[in-house]
Image (cartoon, grey):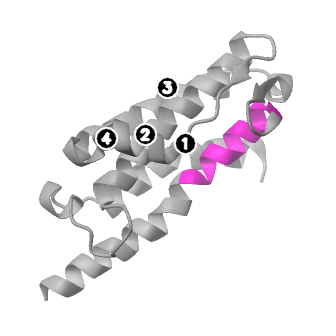
Amino acid sequence: MSLQSLLDQYEADADHLARVVAEVTQEESLLHPIPDTWSILEVVCHLADYETIYSDRMKRVLAEDNPTLPAALPEDFSSALHYQERDLAEELAVIAAVRRQTGRLLRAIDLEQYQRTGVHTEDGPVTLETLLERIVIHIPHHLSFIEAKIAAIRSSAS
């Protein structure tokens, strides 16, 4: 995928996510329609948390020389950060704001800056371009899970 396409998708996916969950109520977002999986709210909280993590990683790679990028375990975040008590609309707003701000920054830098690196504590050296590629696939990866949960909620209501 070209850098232009990556940036376009990066900026568009927050809106796509918001459209998918637009009809989901806060109460529905708390349900677990598929056993042993996260609720819609928990998935969206995970996405919001990782938006800030990836934005921070990308900014560190730009601002620091070969910074250390600590790993982050989703289970640690979900258990410690009260996902079931957070607000769906607020989490969507975080995702949108981070993508707007970081997208603007990424469009302003020179092409060679995408090859700057940081050292991920589990994956080793990663470029800014690789970090962007990873976060670009994150929302689409989770959308299928969210859509399955919405379908299960709707089918149980009818």
Question: Marks 3 and 1: CB-CB under 8 Å?
Answer: no
Task: Single out the mark in the foreground, 4 or 2.
Answer: 2
26 relative position to 90: left or right: left
Question: Marks 2 and 1: CB-CB under 8 Å?
Answer: yes
Residue 83 x, y percent position in the rendering: 29, 45
Image quarter for residue 91?
top left
> Which amino acid, mark 2?
Phe
Residue 69 x, y percent position in the rendering: 68, 26
111 relative position to 54: left or right: right
Question: Which quarter of the figure is the C terminus placed in?
Answer: bottom left
Provide the residue designation for mark 1.
Answer: 73
Question: Which quarter of the figure is the N terminus placed in?
Answer: bottom right
Secondary structure mostly taken by the magenta-highlighted segment of the chain = helix
> Which amino acid, mark 3?
Gln
Describe the element under mark 1 as helix, strand or loop: loop
Is any part of residue 103 visible from this angle? no
**Which residue is at 40% across, 38% downward?**
96
Q: Residue 89 magenta-drawn?
A: no
- Magenta span: 125-138
Q: CA distance from mark 4 to mark 3?
A: 16 Å
Task: Pick the residue in front: 76 or 86.
Answer: 76
Question: Marks 4 and 3: CB-CB under 8 Å?
Answer: no
Provide the residue designation for mark 2.
Answer: 77
Provide the residue designation for mark 3.
Answer: 101
Give the vertical position of 95 relative to 66 (above or below): below
Q: Residues within 10 Å of mark 4 (few under 14, many from 20)?
A: some
Q: CA distance from mark 4 to mark 1?
A: 19 Å
Of pointers 3 and 1, the one earlier in the residue sequence: 1
